[in-house]
Amino acid sequence: MCSDRVQLPNPHLDRVTGNEADYLMHLGIHRVDWHVFKDVKFVCVGGTVDRMRKLSQHLAEKLNIQKLDYSFENHRYSGFKVGPIFCVTHGIGTPSLSVMLHEVFKLLYRAGCSDVTLIRIGTCGGVGVRHGTVVVSTGAITPGFEPFYITSSLGEILKLPTDADPILYQDIVNSKSIEDKYDVISGLTFCTEDFYQGQGRFDGSFCDYTQEERAAFLSKLRQMGVVNLEMESAGVLGMARKVGIKAAVVCVVLVDRMEAELPSPDLDIALLQEYPITLVSRYIVKKLSN
Ligand code: R2B
């Protein structure tokens, strides 16, 4: 599944744009900058600028390497580069994520990168899992309860398998230290295209189900082995698998959705978001020192 040099399964790419003319429109990166990214071995993605900035700062300190900021030209995404690690934001949901990933994969290809690993660091709701727990996804299922990232091609539904690389996710789980004040588990992730009805919430602007139907939905997920809910895992796992790049999804639980809709107001969400940052950084630092 994993390749050495990044290759893209697009026979038209070099004919249509060629290395000279290609331009990463949403990242605003031109060919003059390809070479800057040549050394990238890890791409870390996450929803917000703040989380990616904290991750890159943490990595810069651990590795004693300078952090470079990329305020991408058209302000859709933000990025930070710490030596061989490129951290990029993806916003909310797979449409926003997929545009960024297409361009990051092209960047890796154009720059001639090899042995690249992609890791999403995020937040999620738990399904029978308490807040503060870090979940490393073993795979993602999507509405319809199937293990596919559902996108489209020429107007037809395109389904990309979403199983995660078992060695990678186990290595990340094993990166937990006994000093960590959080639990780390692995399990299936339910990835939705909507935060409210899609995840069985009652507090959206409209809602078409009963309390019983919502409870049955969460129980069904639980029985299928789902331990958390979020909105990007299927895109990360499905798209990375399609281009032969290893990928993992590591999210901290903000609220057990079997108990509540929203995190408790007195929860220190900033602190919880540091948990996957420390876990993934430890994994990356260990890998880079090997
Ligand atoms: C988790 O949190 C965001 C929604 O609040 C979304 O990006 C996700 O997957």
Image: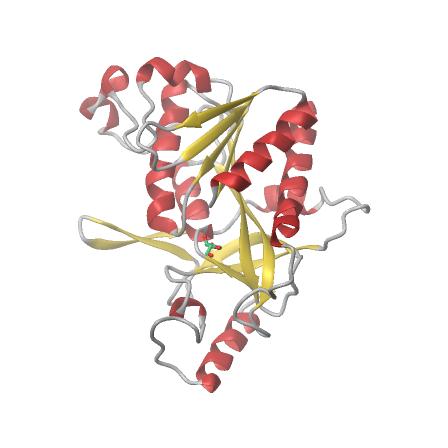
Describe residue 63's horizontal placement relative to residue 200 as left or right. Answer: right
* Relative height, residue 130 to residue 259 (above, below): above
* Relative height, residue 104 to residue 176 (above, below): above
User: From this viewpoint, which residue is outermost toward the right?
Assistant: 178
* Relative height, residue 78 to residue 191 (above, below): above
Describe residue 261's horizontal placement relative to residue 93 as left or right. Answer: right
Quadrant (top left/top right/bottom left/bottom right) for the C terminus: top right
Display colour scheme: secondary structure
For image coordinates 22% across by 29% down, the residue present is 12
Q: Is residue 119 visible?
A: no
Residue 179 is situated, as x and y percent measured from the top left of the image, at: 81, 45
Q: Can residue 53 be seen in this view?
A: yes
Describe residue 63's horizontal placement relative to residue 124 as left or right. Answer: right
Residue 53 is situated, as x and y percent measured from the top left of the image, at: 54, 34
Describe residue 4's horizontal placement relative to residue 187 as left or right. Answer: left
Q: Which quadrant would residue 242 be assigned to in this image?
A: top left
For image coordinates 62% across by 70% down, the residue present is 128
Residue 2 is situated, as x and y percent measured from the top left of the image, at: 50, 34
